[in-house]
Amino acid sequence: MSSLKIIVTGGAGFIGSSLCEHLIEKGHTVLAYDSLFRGNESNLSGLTGHERFHFMQGDVRDIERLDEAIEHLGGIDLIYHLAAVNGTKWFHEAAHSVIDVNINGTLRTLELAMAHDARYVLASSPEAFGEALQQPIKDGNEMTFTDPSLHQRHSYGASKYLDEIACQHAARDGLDVRIVRPFNAYGPRLLGDEYGQVVAMFFQAILSQEPIQLHNGGLQTRSFTWIRDVVDGFLLAGLEDEGRQGESLKGRAFNIGSTEEVTIQELQERIFSIVEKDPAWDKDLPTVEVVDGYHGDAARRLPDCSEAEKLFTWRATTWLDQGLQQMWSALR
Ligand SMILES: NC(=O)c1ccc[n+]([C@@H]2O[C@H](COP(=O)([O-])OP(=O)(O)OC[C@H]3O[C@@H](n4cnc5c(N)ncnc54)[C@H](O)[C@@H]3O)[C@@H](O)[C@H]2O)c1
């Protein structure tokens, strides 16, 4: 495959920074574009000074700045659009910004891809299915959302839903668009602060000796997916010209997730068991508090990954215990 010119929006974030590293490793020229709202340039420190890597700080809604980014790259073959307001605590708290960034950012970058005839990959989410009453989550399931007067958590999921509509519309107009839905990615750079995500928050609580909070009794299940597996899904979805048997990838959506389903309580127990076995860790484990959870938290989020399996032979390869062990080793 020839060397491509690629922009990764949200490139300083958790998934974006790993994606940039692997794209560089594959010989492409990459520009990470990020407002640093939640991402951090330190996530990209391994790429600093690399001749094929560029970083530009900018807002994904700012079309002039995006034009500058493309000029800096000297053209564009592929846009990976990952920039979004992510982090569950924001969704209800800052619904206006979530809607603004997630929808307008997608519209602007889609317009850019169309203007340059570049391939486009959207980072969507299983939350595009809203309450996700049908499991496993797969194309064709209903996407259903709660009455917005009750809570505004679905600012995120509904924005991803509209992003997917905009992508399918662009595909209908001829753009080579692909959609990736990662399922609860985790790994060492995941944010563990109060606006972070659950795996990192649990590790963070252990490291800072603060109580662990289990939302809604911890009975909701998730399918945690190791960062390398998630990035492999993004690489395949963006870099392959067609499916394994020559299928067109235009307008296809790929669930990228582990099928190892655990409750949040089980996640906490598995993390405790890894830390307990660590001879180098002699501190007490934190207490566990059961608290009210976030509004609209889905009871399950189980992926059907048959599309990625069929078209790319992709499947998650890292068991949860292996990933948690690697994450603990990297963090402590
Ligand atoms: N992590 C997951 O498990 C998961 C699951 C489903 C979907 N996703 C999607 O994948 C993408 C990447 O997620 P992540 O986990 O790396 O989150 P992240 O928050 O680490 O990355 C998102 C990046 O977007 C940047 N950003 C936010 N607003 C911006 C703006 N206005 N202009 C430019 N940049 C802006 C942030 O600074 C951040 O670096 C997001 O679109 C997210 O919705 C992630």
Image (cartoon, helix red, strand yellow):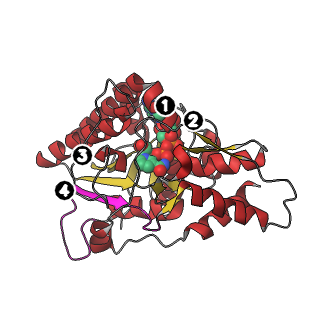
Give the alpha-carbon distance from disc 2 to disc 1, as whole Å: 7 Å
Q: Is residue 126 or residue 19 the one in the foreground?
A: 126
- Mark 4 surroundings: few (<14), some (14-19) or many (≥20) residues within 10 A: few
The residue at label 4 has a CB less than 8 Å from ligand 1: no
Q: Position of residue 256 (x, y in %)?
A: 39, 61
Mark 3 crowdedness (10 Å alpha carbons): few <14, some 14-19, many ≥20: some
Do we see residue 48 in this rendering? no
Q: CA distance from mark 4 to mark 2?
A: 32 Å
Tell me which residue sits at (65%, 43%) in the image: 42
Disc 3 secondary structure class? loop
Please report the bounds of the magenta region as a residue range: 241-260
Amino acid type, mark 4: Gly
Q: Which residue was labeled with disc 4? A: 140
99 or 104, which lies in front? 99
Residue 246 image point, x, y percent: 19, 73
Numbered disc 2: secondary structure: loop
Q: In the image, which disc is placed on residue 90?
A: 1
Q: Residue at x 34, y 59 (%)?
A: 255
Q: Is residue 247 left or right of residue 106?
A: left
Q: Amino acid at mark 2?
A: Tyr
Q: Which mark is residue 143?
A: 3
**Distance from Cα at disc 3 to Cα at disc 2:** 25 Å
- Dot 2 and dot 1 residues touching (CB under 8 Å): yes
The numbered disc on residue 195 is: 2
Q: In the picture provided, is 48 more to the left or to the right than 57?
A: right
First along the sequence among labels 3 and 2: 3
